[in-house]
Image: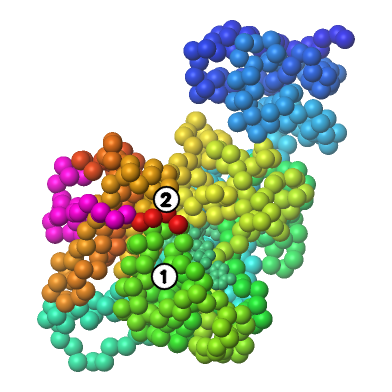
Amino acid sequence: MSSPPGRRARLSSPGTGRSSSETREELRRRLLGLIEGNRVMIFSKSYCPHSTRVKELFSSLGVECHILELDQVDDGASVQEVLSEITNQRTVPNIFVNKVHVGGCEQTFQAHQSGVLEKLLQGDSAYDYDLIVIGGGSGGLACAQEAAVLGKKVMVLDFVVPSPQGTSWGLGGTCVNVGCIPKKLMHQAALLGQALIDSRKFGWEYNQQVKHNWETMTEAIQNHIGSLNWGYRLSLREKAVAYVNSYGEFVEHHKIKATNRKGQETCYTAAKFVIATGERPRYLGIQGDKEYCITSDDLFSLPYCPGKTLVVGASYVALECAGFLAGLGLDVTVMVRSILLRGFDQEMAEKVGSYMEQHGVKFLRKFVPVMVSLGDIWNSFYFLFTPSLVLLAIGRDSCTRKIGLEKIGVKINEKSGKIPVNDVEQTNVPYVYAIGDILEGKLELTPVAIQAGKLLARRLFGDLMPECDYVNVPTTVFTPLEYGCCGLSEEKAIEVHTKENLEVYHTLFWPLEWTVAGRDNNTCYAKIICNKFDNVLVGFHILGPNAGEVTQGFAAAMKCGLTKQLLDDTIGIHPTCGEVWKEKTFLKLTSVDVV
Ligand code: FAD
Ligand code: NAP
């Protein structure tokens, strides 16, 4: 067989001959250099018949190719591994045309038949956009804007399917519209109620009856959200990101169908896609749930005060909503199926619960609802509970099942609906990436989605940047007494490091602001878990006012390898809750047992 025209890539420096001393990062950079520096780059094996077919195709088109025969270089195996990290394709031939990853032999022939290959060879973009992001929430917007700043042609599709109660909202995703923002503002409204009570002890005198007006609060919060929605639209416009308020669904490779509110359909193509479709609240699947219950998607814009409320569920969303509703003076009961705050340190979780209980929230433990009828809810022991409102907070489902992923072969975890990705947020289909809440095994938090989105755009279109670090992500549960943490729970630390290798220090504390106000002593609590041998903190937990503010700084310190000794050596800020470690902390003698 005659050899097609093609320049063979040099095998020694600047080719591939420095394998032994060359770091993986250098190899990656060099491969990207080859991809970027050549109109057609083929990673091939000299004996592979598919590689030969592709070389012949380019030869018949009269196109010169740069070819690296992986079986003829010392570090062919490493090249193949790094290539598979870059493209998620392990096999040869692996073909790039004008920096666009075309794929293997079959995909190259398909591209030739559809005319895409010729467009790519002409240097024209074969696609309408460099990047289409599906989902304009925390992760999607961060990724789209960053890619646009790096000079790419970007489109964002964002569409809110109304909740079963008919609630819908604007651009920005869960966090802005029905998550962090309205939740924290309603938490603040509840804290202000407590501050009013405290204020009398500090000398404030007022005679008027103090009461809370739900409608005023909701209107003010929704107005603020409206301004954020507008700000996002403006910011996309300024960065020349095309925003389309339509539902996106893959119809074929590199092609998406966008359906707007009126049912009009338009198709768009892109070289790369990022899926950032987030999650929506789950329903119980029992009689009456969709008719008579609401979820967090409806709560923050509810046009009337909920009154006596039953919250079903016992994690973040359930306890935070129960907490602020009780703080606003409502009669609130939480129906708990098993434990509070699954996945969190259980000693802390129980303290969160007992504070809520002391402050008026009722807990119905080991119950699940079995039926809801107008105004009534029947639980697993068949007794009747009659709240004015039932709020379901039993978890969230990934929006991945109705977006045509099967049409292009993107794999999801069939059970959870989550998308598995590699360390660079790439799915099993090389040109499709995923970020945010829909990722398998990652934390569902706004800053995580934003960080992953930004770094992904920079890696795809800018200089090489580090991968998103999902370790030691701090978080705070905004319950009436806030709980901030970073690193491992005590249970998880024991599971990972074993009890013998750990030291746990803890203390109760009384914030200064609470003393004059006469608020609960021996309630706020802080705990650190350290490795006994190198003293490094593996877990940080604090239950007290402004726990989120306190935890953020400790998270940065933990990223730098904070040790107990360094903590002891750091001078505190007086008087604050963050200086609790400067007061007496005690070695915890009885650690929890792993169950
Ligand atoms: P989202 O922000 O959910 O965005 C996805 C977007 O894609 C949505 O606008 C959706 O409508 C759209 N979409 C879906 N399918 C399609 C489609 N096919 N076509 C077009 N558009 C589509 N996190 C924190 O860090 N701190 C908090 O205090 C906090 N509080 C929370 C409180 C509540 C009540 C809830 C529910 C969540 C909270 N979270 C919090 C979690 C946080 O909101 C999420 O982690 C974050 O919003 C995830 O971002 P995302 O980009 O993955 O998805
Ligand atoms: P979640 O963490 O998945 O918790 C679901 C809760 O519902 C659990 O308590 C679970 O009980 C219970 N539950 C599930 N099915 C049930 C059923 N059939 N009947 C009764 N109870 C049932 O969900 P979430 O609270 O909605 O939170 C989702 C994500 O949003 C979180 O992972 C978090 O990352 C994010 N979030 C973050 C914040 C924040 O940062 N402050 C706030 C809110 C949400 P079991 O324990 O028995 O399974």
Q: Which mark is residue 320?
A: 1
The percent coordinates of residue 555 (x first, y second) are 33, 48
Main SS of the magenta segment? loop
Res. 71 in view: yes
Up-down: is 467 above or below 443?
Answer: above
The residue under the point 50% across, 45% down is 452
Dividing the image into 4 quarters, which one contains the N terminus? top right
Residue, far right: 1
Q: CA separation, marks 2 and 1? A: 23 Å
Mark 2 close to ligand 2, CB under 8 Å: no
Q: Nearer the viewer, residue 554 or 248?
A: 554
Q: Nearer the viewer, residue 235 or 395?
A: 395
Pointer 2 with pointer 1, Cβ within 8 A: no
The three-letter amino acid code for the residue at tag 1 is: Glu
The residue under the point 16% across, 82% down is 200
**In magenta stretch: residue 590:** yes
The percent coordinates of residue 137 (x first, y second) are 53, 57
Q: Secondary structure at mark 2?
A: helix
Res. 327 in view: no
The three-letter amino acid code for the residue at tag 2 is: Lys
- Name the residue tied to disc 2: 492
Camera-side mark, 2 or 1: 2
Up-down: is 475 above or below 339?
Answer: above
Quarter of the figure with residue 35? top right
Q: Nearer the viewer, residue 534 or 85?
A: 534
The residue under the point 61% across, 62% down is 397
Q: Tell me where the magenta segment starts and ends, as one range.
A: 567-591
Q: Residues within 10 Å of mark 1 (few under 14, many from 20)?
A: many
The residue under the point 74% across, 53% down is 404
The percent coordinates of residue 78 (x first, y second) are 60, 20
Mark 1 close to ligand 2, CB under 8 Å: yes
Whichever of labels 2 and 1 marks the residue nearer the N terminus, that label is 1
